[in-house]
């Protein structure tokens, strides 16, 4: 489904997709993709866009770029008024003290969902993270139905976000595709990336599919390319996502350049997120 999909047309009317975090690493790539493919976008970030001129030609129809804080309920309602869907890429994407995560990954996300409900938005694509399950060992094969296992306060915030998304689906009928994003990079550069890489091209395809696949309800998808060595299994997802890239194409060079990795980092899928502040004493063998 293309621009006739649920996120592009509601009740026959073409409505914009709101992209939050439009100035971030993924946001910049998605913004360029939306403009290139003709998807009607409305963009926001807490900071000014360095390349705001790219948005200007679309301002009249979609609302262009609006700088603001998603922790402000009134700003969220204004931003989502008349929107068909939301791609939520804003928030903190690294480990931070809890108070900082609370402001951006909990409170602001609640205001996003509540304003979406009030404005009649029917679908959200939520940037979760592979760190929601990062304490699993690297020899574990995971699928989205397995229990969460966060590796950090950051990963925990993403687990909470997935729970909020499920609540708003079950109680209010707002569909959400939760993207447990892997290693979003132009190309893979580490051994871990052989399992977790998400190319720019596949990230755009994943968001397109998450917006346009009908009747997704609540779905969780691991955001990865079609990596031969993937730890994650997306075979049962509802979203019609078909990755084109594979980190294995870079394996020979990556393995040749590989440097020693900390034992804890190489043990857990969350790598340094899992290893940081790790203090558990292994149980004694009986």
Image (tube, helix red, strand yellow):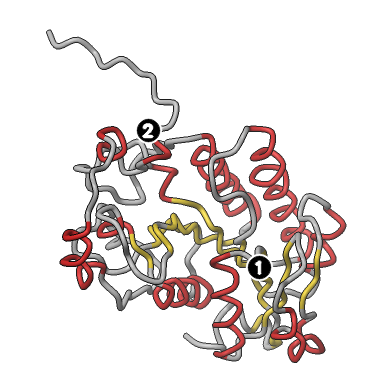
Q: Residue furthest right?
A: 74
The residue tagged 2 is: 275
- Image coordinates of residue 115 in percent, x first then y, are 77, 57
Position in image of residue 26 (x %, y %): 54, 67
The residue carrying mark 1 is 23
- Observer-nearest of 60 and 114: 60
Where does residue 76 sit, x and y in percent of width and height?
A: 79, 60
Question: In this rendering, would 159 be left or right of 20?
Answer: left
Query: Under tag 1, what secondary structure?
Result: loop
Query: Looking at the image, which residue is at 67% across and 38% down?
Result: 102
Compared with residue 137, is residue 217 higher up or lower down, i.e. above or below? below
* Residue nearer the viewer, 249 or 233: 249
As displayed, is residue 143 above or below residue 100? below
Q: Earlier in the sequence, mark 1 or mark 2?
A: 1
Q: Residues within 10 Å of mark 2 (few under 14, many from 20)?
A: some
Q: Residue at x 72, y 49 (%)?
A: 108
């Amino acid at each position: 489904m293309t621009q006739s999909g649920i996120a592009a047309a509601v009740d026959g009317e073409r409505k914009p997709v709101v992209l939050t975090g439009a100035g971030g690493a993924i946001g910049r790539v998605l913004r360029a993709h939306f403009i290139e493919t003709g998807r009607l976008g409305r963009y926001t970030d807490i900071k000014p866009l360095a390349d705001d001129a790219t948005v200007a030609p679309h301002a009249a129809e979609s609302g262009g770029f609006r700088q603001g804080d998603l922790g402000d309920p009134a700003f969220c309602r204004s931003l989502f008024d008349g929107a068909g869907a939301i791609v939520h890429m804003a928030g903190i994407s690294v480990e931070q003290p809890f108070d900082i995560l609370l402001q951006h990954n909990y409170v602001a996300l609640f205001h996003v969902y509540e304003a979406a409900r009030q404005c009649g938005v029917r679908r959200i694509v939520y940037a979760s993270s592979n760190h929601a399950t990062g304490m699993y060992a690297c020899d574990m094969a995971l699928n989205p139905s397995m229990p969460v296992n966060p590796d950090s306060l950051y990963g925990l915030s993403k687990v909470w976000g997935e729970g909020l998304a499920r609540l708003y689906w079950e109680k209010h009928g707002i569909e959400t595709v939760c993207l447990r994003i892997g290693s979003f990079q132009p190309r893979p550069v580490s051994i871990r990336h052989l399992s977790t890489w998400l190319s720019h091209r596949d990230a755009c395809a994943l968001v397109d599919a998450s917006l346009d696949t009908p009747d997704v309800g609540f779905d969780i998808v691991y955001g990865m390319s079609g990596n031969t060595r993937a730890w994650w299994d997306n075979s049962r997802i509802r979203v019609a996502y078909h990755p084109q890239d594979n980190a294995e194409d870079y394996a020979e060079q990556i393995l040749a350049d590989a440097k020693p990795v900390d034992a804890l980092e190489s043990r857990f899928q969350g790598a340094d997120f899992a290893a940081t502040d790790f203090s558990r004493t292994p149980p004694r063998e009986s």
